[in-house]
């Protein structure tokens, strides 16, 4: 395993390596597996080594793919972040349609639009398109999140009510993407929930790329985590 890689993919078809083994043999194989992925250079009998070889080949292939992505992330970071796709440039104030603005949604709304917000005046209402936000997060951080759960959706909606804007969300994602700490850690902490936190938006939405790259020491990060914990405690009171 490479330095900084804390996760592995376990494939369901590996059951073929285990299903005909005794409990003792299966235990030896799984122990061999965990020692291998933790770089402990395991030594086992010939049977376990033969059974583990297909698994090892898959792990090495996945590791090579992960290292390639890490190198790409670092190169993009040095260039100021991953190049944006052309469609995100068409409306820089609303990347990939993260927020839809409805003018007086009680009137002139097409049949294809579902309005779930009640209003008493004609003020603009901004509604986050969570499908597009999820796509944008996955694209920015090379992640594969499938959904944004309801709790996180409510958190984003609360940020809008508090005065955060579409531009703040966009800048936050862009500056996190360019942050040295997050680049070196493969964006493993860059979840929708993390982005929805007020302390994250406060830190990354207003800073420029240079500052975002420089605020990446371990001490800085530890201090920020403590602030986030306090913020979450206050939100849950």
Image: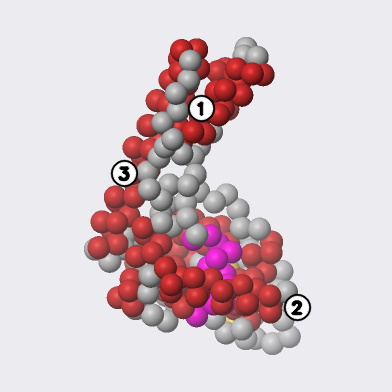
Residue 2 is left or right of residue 123, and the answer is left
Give the overall secondary structure of the magenta segment. helix
Region of the chain picked out in magenta, as a range: 190-202
- Which quadrant does the N terminus fall into? top left
Callout 1: SS: helix
Residue 56 location, x and y as percent?
43, 26
For disc 1, the marked residue is: 32
| 78 up-or-down from 93: above or below | above
Residue at image position (55%, 18%) is 17
Q: Is residue 21 magenta?
A: no
Residue at image position (73%, 85%) is 120
Foreground of the two, 216 or 162: 216
Residue 40 location, x and y as percent?
44, 35
Foreground of the two, 101 or 3: 3
Near mark 2 (Cα within 10 A), the count class, few <14, some 14-19 or many ≥20, is: few
Q: Given this view, does label 1 or label 3 mark the residue nearer the observer?
A: 1
For disc 3, the marked residue is: 68
| 76 up-or-down from 41: above or below | below
Residue at image position (37%, 59%) is 183
Labels 1 and 3: the sequence-earlier one = 1
Residue 199 is left or right of residue 110, and the answer is left
Q: Can you see residue 69?
A: yes
Callout 2: SS: loop
For disc 2, the marked residue is: 237
- Measured Cα–Cα span from mark 2 to mark 1: 46 Å
Residue 118 location, x and y as percent?
74, 77
């Amino acid at each position: 395993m490479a330095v900084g890689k804390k996760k592995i993919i376990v494939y369901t078809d590996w059951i073929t390596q285990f299903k005909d083994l005794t409990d003792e043999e299966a235990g030896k194989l799984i122990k061999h597996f965990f020692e291998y992925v933790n770089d402990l250079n395991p030594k086992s009998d010939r049977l376990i080594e033969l059974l583990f070889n297909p698994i090892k080949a898959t792990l090495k292939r996945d590791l090579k793919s992960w290292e390639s992505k890490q190198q790409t992330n670092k190169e993009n970071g040095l260039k100021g972040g991953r190049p944006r796709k052309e469609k995100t440039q068409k409306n820089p104030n609303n990347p990939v349609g993260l927020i839809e603005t409805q003018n007086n949604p009680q009137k002139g709304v097409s049949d294809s639009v579902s309005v779930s917000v009640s209003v008493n005046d004609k003020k603009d209402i901004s509604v986050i398109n969570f499908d597009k936000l999820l796509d944008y997060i996955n694209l920015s951080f090379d992640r594969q999140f499938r959904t944004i759960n309801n709790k996180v959706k409510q958190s984003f909606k609360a940020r809008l009510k508090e005065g955060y804007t579409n531009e703040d969300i966009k800048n936050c994602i862009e500056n996190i993407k360019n942050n040295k700490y997050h680049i070196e850690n493969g964006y493993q902490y860059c979840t929708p929930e993390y982005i929805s936190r007020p302390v994250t938006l406060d830190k990354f939405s207003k800073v420029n790329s240079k500052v975002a790259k420089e605020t990446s020491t371990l001490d800085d990060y530890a201090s920020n985590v403590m602030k986030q914990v306090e913020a979450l405690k206050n939100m849950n009171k």
